[in-house]
Image: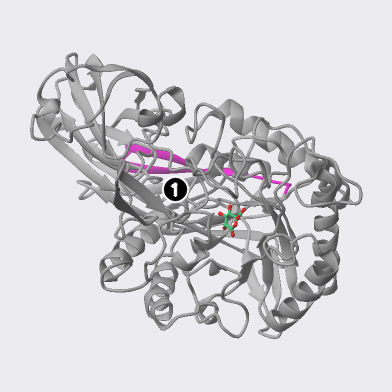
Amino acid sequence: MLRPQDNQIRERKNLNGMWQFRLDSDGTGRSDGWYSGALPEAESMAVPASFNDLSTDAATRDFVGDIWYQNDVKIPRGWQHDRVVLHFESATHRATVWVDDVEVVSHEGGYLPFEADITGHVTPGQTARVTVCVNNTLSFQSIPPGVIEETPAGRKQIYWHDFFNYAGIHRSVWLHTTPRAHLEDVTVTTAVEGGTGIVTCDVSSLGAEGLTVRAIIRDADRHVVAEAQGHSATLSIADVILWKPLASYLYDLEVQLVDGEDVVDSYHQKIGVRTVEIDGARFLINGEPFYFTGFGMHEDHITIGKQHDNASMIRDFELLDWIGANSLRTSHYPYSEDVMDYCDEKGIVVIDETPAVGMNMALGGGIFGGQGYETFSPETINDDTQAVHADVIRDLIARDKNHPSVVMWSIANEPESDSEGAEKYFGPLFEVAREADPTRPVGFVNVMLSPHGKCRVSQFADVLMLNRYWGWYVATGDLVAAQAMARAELTAWAGDGKPIIMTEYGADTYPGEHQLPAQPWSEEYQNAYLDANHEVFDEIDAVVGEQMWNFADFMTTAGIMRVGGNKKGAFTRDRQPKMAAHHLRRRWSK
Ligand code: GCB
């Protein structure tokens, strides 16, 4: 699938704006055919947005079930000869879409795009009714997982991940065209030989028998630097300018479908030429050792929840630049493609993560509730879940494979990884990722409950990604003990000979809380905690990165461990620095 774009052949129309909206409290919308006419008793709702925090009503905020959206869409008059496609960048966690009375697509998974060819169901120049039934229920067969518990107060959604289950249409909705004979997908890989960039370009097309593919690479000044023909082509860029961390350089690859001299279809893809390799315990980008600085992030903002918004994104990237971060992890789900494009443009290195989070029922520990489940079992996370998880890995890689900023895949965050069930579940998923992308390292993020010697999944990983809270969840307030724990465990992991990235370490900090000597929750403690951890990271050569948890404070489910959400941010939820942000800036700007 190619993201909609406007070019000399293709057109797109943005469908963001006010839609009709209704929560299906009785669950009767489908049987009553709410798609077959104007949505009854509907209100207005912004698209994109999470609906949860727009309302002042708790029942709306915590609603679980079907959420209906509807919009009358004018199909542009000039599109008679084109293929017309309806494209959603995401709908959380699943959606079914109707155009007038016809169901056109159903999609599982809350953070990846889907689309439907609706050419046969619409008439250019006329209006079509688009109805979307979004569903936000989490089950043992969804990624991320959850369970509905019947409580005296009604049905309650339980989940084991530490961020609020925001839902809705979170990213842009598009109507777009392609020609009937069209380009379907483009896969780019890059290598470097001496000063020459080698770009391989594999193209698939539909309905294009007898047509040829032409690939043209232009530099930033729009000069053609390489050209080739064929569905599989290798192009050479002489005197290539590499894409480097914090020093991005992007070429424009134009792929054309041609009939003699006629360009039938065209697609522009920004590409960066760079290499990624693991060499023992070193992580090499363009053959040079790379040390990750930055954060695990969240798509999380006041009022709009998980809505993607370009202005907020720019603020976040300004802060990343200010603090000296060179990388981020898309914890704990794929981010908007606008974010991925911006990482390419800014030279921010990305660990790209699937939405597989909260697959660890032992972690509840008072944070999430819902005790008493076995993580991997025929009744809980099982083969069906694994199949959904495999699809999500393939879909993430299909979406993000051409981003130079993406240097590795994280197939899960903190799953239970010390059991036989985990080993059986994850082994094949690493293969799925490697088959989908043989060019990038694959890993998962290890939890402190499965330390070195107990973890049965890290054997499959190219890079060890560790989340550790020495001095917070363990040795709370005792940084001397915390350092001893950190040193012992990291030394053990280093013995595996793989690079280690500290993908999380952090301390909840209430902005404005001050204590001397430093105590947990104070800004002083967050700084002392960082120093204690950094000192140990600096001692261990195999540690090739530190991504503090979290970039900013974010909303979570209610619980006694959280004060208005998770407060481990270096920045507050409204993106102002805590003392720790200044502290990190001094370290990372050296
Ligand atoms: C973790 C999780 C992250 C949580 C964090 C915390 O290990 O990966 O999602 O938010 O800990 O603050 O507890």
Residue 254 part of the magenta segment: yes
Drawn side of residue 465 relative to residue 495, left or right:
left
Amino acid marked by disc 1: Ala
Hey, which residue is sitting farthest front in the picture? Answer: 152
Give the image location of residue 63, x and y in percent: 33, 35
**Quadrant of residue 300 in the image?**
top right
**Quadrant in which residue 433 is drawn:** bottom left
Q: Is residue 267 visible?
A: yes
Instruction: Indicate whether 287 appears above or below 400.
Output: below
Circle 1 residues within 10 Å: few <14, some 14–19, many ≥20: many
Note whether residue 118 is visible.
no
Q: Position of residue 60 (x, y in %)?
A: 36, 29
Q: Secondary structure at mark 1?
A: strand
Judge left or right: residue 102 versus residue 70: left
> Is the stretch drawn in magenta largely helix, strand or loop?
strand
269 in relation to 546, above or below:
above
Image position of 38 (left or right of 323): left
The residue located at (62%, 67%) in the rendering is 465
Which quadrant of the structure image shows residue 372? bottom left
User: In the image, which residues are magenta?
Assistant: 246-268
Q: Quadrant of ligand 1?
A: bottom right
Residue at 36% x, 72% y: name it. 376
How many numbered markers are drawn?
A: 1
Q: How is the image coloured?
A: one colour
Q: Is residue 44 magenta?
A: no
Q: Disc 1 designates what residue?
A: 215
Task: Name which residue lies at 53% across and 62% down.
Answer: 365
